[in-house]
Amino acid sequence: MAACFHQLNLTPIRSAFQSFQSNPNPTPKCARFRSRSAAISNPKRSYNITLLPGDGIGPEVISIAKDVLSLAASLEGIEFQFQEMPVGGAAIDSVGVPLPDETLSVAKQSDAVLLGAIGGYKWDKNEKHLKPETGLLLLRAGLEVFANLRPATVLPQLIDASTLKKEVAEGVDLMVVRELTGGIYFGKPRGFGTNEKGEDIGFNTELYSTTEVDRIARIAFETARKRRGKLCSVDKANVLEASILWRKRVTKIASEYPDVELSHMYVDNAAMQLIRNPKQFDTIVTNNIFGDILSDEASMLTGSIGMLPSASLGESGPGLFEPIHGSAPDIAGQDKANPLATILSAAMLLRYGLGEEHTAKRIEDAVLETLNKGFRTGDIHSTGKMLVGCKAMGEEVLRSVDSQRPAAVSYQN
Ligand code: IPM
Ligand code: MG
C-alpha cells in the first residue's frame, strides 16, 4: 500500500514531554464490546484524559473516539479515566464563557486532551470574548501548545474522494507543522480605532520572537527527520518583517539538522504548489495564520476534511488533540458525521501525547481495515461502497479493533 497512517509517525519528538501520572479506578466502557474492554484488574499504565466534546458534531464523534480509545487501550493493558468538560458554545450556554476556568484547570492536570469541535450559528453574532472560537484560542494559549501537527495523507482507498486528478493526488503524504500560539492571532497591539480621516479601523499585529520561531523550527526539523527528511518553510519574507526574522531563524536552526533538506517558499507560491504538485512536499513549517489556511488547503487534497486528525504539543504538559474539521452544524445530531478524524486524533493522542505507539497503531490499522471493508460515511462515499452513519462507522472500527490479536499487529520502532 502506498500510504498508511503509521508513516505519520514522529514518536520521539514528544517522548521527552510526557507525564505518566497514574490514577486509581478507571473503567473503560463500551457496551457492545464489553468482554474485551471491561476494567483491567492490573493495568500496566493508566492515564487521565480530558474530553472536550464541544459543539455541533463534536459530542457524536467524541463519544465514538472514547469507545475506540478504551477498547484499543484495554487490549494493551492500559486504562483511561475520562473527564468530560464544557468548552465553546456548550460552555457559553452552560457556564457563560467559552473556556471556563475549571475546564482549563482539569485539562492542564490531565495527561492529554481530546477535543471534538467548537462553534455554531447560534453564537456567530456574539461579541468576540463570547465566541466559541475564543475558547479554543484560550485553550491553546492556556495549554501552551505551540506546535500544531496536521498530517494530510491521501489514502489509496479514498483516492476517488479527491477533487484533484488521480495522478496528482496519489501518494500525497505531507505534514503541516503550524505555529499555534503566536503570530497575528495573538500579537499586540490589536483592536479597533479611528484613523486620521475619522474612519473606523481594525488592526492586528503579526509578531514573532526568536524563541517562538526557534522552538517551532526544531519541532519541524525533528518531524521532517522522522519522515522523508525534507522541510519547506513557508513565509512572506518578500513583504513582512516577521517573515524575514522567521526565515533567518529557520535557516540558523537548520545547521543543527544537516540531515534535513531545507527549502523556503513564499506562501502564495506554496498555495499554488500544493495544488499543482503536492507530492513535492514532505514537511511544511509555517506561522499561525498561513498554517491555518494551508492546512485546510492540504486537507482537501485528501478529499475530505472529515478524515484528518491533528496534534498540538507544547514543551511540557498535556497535548491537545482534535480533528481539523469544524463543528459542521448543518449535519449535527443527524448521525451523518465522519468519526474517523477524531478516531485518528485519538491515535495521535496515544502516539504523541502518551508515547503509546502500539495502541496508536492498533487504531490506525482498524481505521484502514474499516475502509478496506468498504464502509464510508457520506463525505467519502463513492459508488459501490457501503454508506453508513457516524455510529455505524464507529461500530465497524470497534469491531476491527476487537478482532485484532496482539500477534497480528506489526509494531513499528
Ligand atoms: C483551526 C480553526 C481555528 C483557527 C478557529 C476555529 C479559531 O480554523 O483550528 O484551524 O483559526 O485556528
Ligand atoms: Mg482553520
Image (cartoon, grey):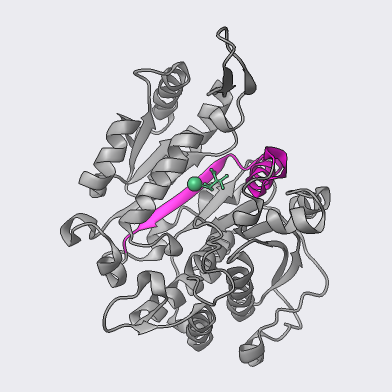
Q: How many marks?
A: 0
Q: Which residue is rendered at x = 69% and y = 40% of the image?
A: 127
Work out which residue is located at the far top of the displayed protein and give it. Answer: 196
Q: Is residue 232 left or right of residue 48?
A: left
Compared across the picture, whether 90 is left or right of 392 comes to right
The N terminus sits in image quarter: bottom left
The image position of residue 216, as x and y in percent, is 51, 35
Q: Residue 356: horizontal and vertical position, in percent?
A: 58, 64
Q: Is residue 343 above or below residue 41?
A: above
Q: Please tell me which residue is depicted at 54% across the width and 77% down the height of the picture.
A: 335
Residue 256 magenta? no
Q: Residue at x 49, y 58 (%)?
A: 325
Q: Quadrant of residue 284?
A: top left
Q: Residue at position x 52%, y 65% from top?
A: 330
Q: Is residue 378 visible?
A: yes
Task: State whether residue 45 is above or below residue 302.
Answer: below
Q: Is residue 222 visible?
A: no
Q: Residue 281: horizontal and vertical position, in percent?
A: 29, 44
Front in this rendered view, residue 55 or 330: 330
Q: Which residues are magenta?
A: 127-154
The x and y percentages for residue 357 are: 53, 64
